[in-house]
Amino acid sequence: MADAKVIPFDDDRSRGSAVQRPQRRRSTGSRRKSGESALVREVQPLPGRAFAQDDVPVTREEQPPQKPQDDGGLERRIAGGLAFLRRRLTGDYEVDDFGYDEELTDQVLMSLLRPVYENYFRVEVKGVENIPSEGGALIVANHSGTLPLDGLMMQVAVHDHHPAGRHLRLLAADLVFMLPVVNELARKLGHTLACAEDAERLLGQGELVGVMPEGFKGIGKPFSERYKLQRFGRGGFVSTALRQGTPIIPCSIVGAEEIYPMIGNAKTLARLLGFPYFPLTPTFPWLGPLGAIPLPTKWTIQFGEPIPTDGYPPEAAEDPMLMFNLTDQVREQIQHTLYKLLVQRRSVFF
């Protein structure tokens, strides 16, 4: 949003000079006749007043304060909202092959996530300039927090802070697309299945793709292992980036580990429900629905320097040693940044 320009009142008036004081002249003759003034005053008229012939000041008729001109902003917002509803009701909107609805994401879903991002978790973003303004790129981040709120906050960070306002397309686990309601919302937000085919297709289209290789091992780890990265799988994300020649951008998120301190795991209940884990926290399930409210921790999201992959030959994507080395490089960079941010952090909540 552009900064508002403040136009000072009294811009055209001289502020250095004061109103001249009335000058007094003494009479030099004898006492004047009755009705004559002993002193004759020369009064300089003040701005905004008129004087009659008998030197009695007459105040000009005051003008009623002018109302600020309506620039039509409210009308435009109302018209835009009505047009949005009309398009939604008539089906006159576009989604891509993955179900991503850009208009709904920008106007509705981001607006719902933004208060949580700005006012609840108070996310601080660093290094967003490391994300390219155009073309494909793969953001690799740590995963934590019992529930995947870190991915959503990362999406808002990229969308709101990147100069080009880019959209982050997250690769999600199968479970996300098996849950009712969550499935539809994830598709609308641009999430897609975490498989190499979808990732390569998005990168080939010049999209910004996000992946969290720790998966459920990271998000469901106990609180005692917070900020300790789990294994990054087999390095499939590196192979995908090598095939497309897109840079890999490490991303470190601090603050998500403490929103649901996981002190236990009800494994039997998790198997019955088909979940990879069932978290037990100091508030859940003991406080019922209130226990599902995350703690208001202070977050920091830092995007590291890109790791280029366009200098490797095409067959490099099949080299297991190269994939292992690049995977380890990305993991070490994320872990090192996490430790650095933790040392700089003064408080979990402030």
Image (tube, rainbow, N blue to C red):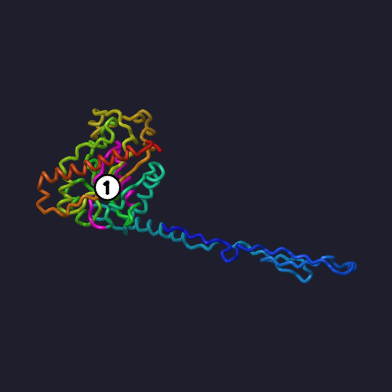
Q: Position of residue 263 (x, y in %)?
A: 30, 28
Q: Quadrant of the C terminus?
A: top left
Instruction: Say above or below: 132 vs 216.
Output: below
Start and end of the magenta stretch? 134-159
> Residue 49 or 107: which is nearer the viewer?
49
How busy is the neighbourhood of tag 1: few (under 14 within 10 Å), some, or many (20 plus)? many
| Residue at the limit of the structure toward the bottom, as seen here | 53
**Horizontal relation, residue 163 to residue 329: left or right:** right
Is 177 located above or below residue 68 in the figure? above
Residue 138 lies in the magenta stretch: yes
Q: Quadrant of residue 216?
A: top left
220 vs 43, nearest the viewer: 43
Residue at (66, 66) in percent of width and height: 47
Residue 214, x across and y down, in percent: 22, 39
Position of residue 33 relative to residue 122, above or below, is below
What's the amino acid at mark 1?
Gly
The residue that disc 1 covers is 304
Q: Secondary structure at mark 1?
A: loop
Question: Whole-percent x and y of residue 257?
Answer: 31, 36
* Quadrant containing the N terminus in the rendered view: bottom left
